[in-house]
Image (cartoon, rainbow, N blue to C red):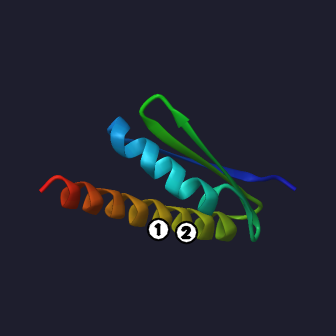
Amino acid sequence: MEKILAEIRIRLPQKNLDVLYHAIKPEIQGRRGRAESEVKLIDNTLVVKLLAGDTTSLRAAFNSCMRQIIGAQDLVEMCHRYLNR
């Protein structure tokens, strides 16, 4: 069976990127349901690769992944604002 691959690339400042990477990797990395994912840092870019057997699984994995990333990024920004006031 052929697999479908999607790659998400998010470029962020280095200070946020390291924290975000370590926050989301345990939540996203590996196999969940009918999709697999891999999280890497390349230069100043967070790279998430999603692999699924069908578009429904890929869409679900993508949405879940983006919710995790957006939530973690919001939390990182909130902490920076709180610590820098």
Quarter containing the C terminus: bottom left
- Tell me what residue is drawn at x 36 percent, y 45 percent: 16
Residue beneath label 2, please? 64
| Secondary structure beneath label 2 | helix
Q: Residue at x 37, y 58 (%)?
A: 73
> Does residue 14 sit above or below 37 in this rendering?
above
| CA–CA distance in space, label 1 to label 2 | 5 Å
Viewer-side residue, 63 vs 21: 21
Residue placed most toward the observer, 34 or 80: 80
Q: Which mark is residue 67?
A: 1
Residue 50's spot in the image, x, y percent?
Answer: 65, 53
Q: Position of residue 40 (x, y in %)?
A: 59, 40
Q: Relative to residue 76, is residue 68 drawn left or right?
A: right
Instruction: Report helix, strand or loop for mark 1.
Output: helix
Q: What is the x, y in percent for residue 35?
A: 73, 62
Dot 1 and dot 2 residues touching (CB under 8 Å): yes
- Label 1: few (<14), some (14–19) or many (≥20) C-alpha neighbours in 10 Å: few
Query: The disc labelled 2 sits on which kind of residue?
Result: Ser
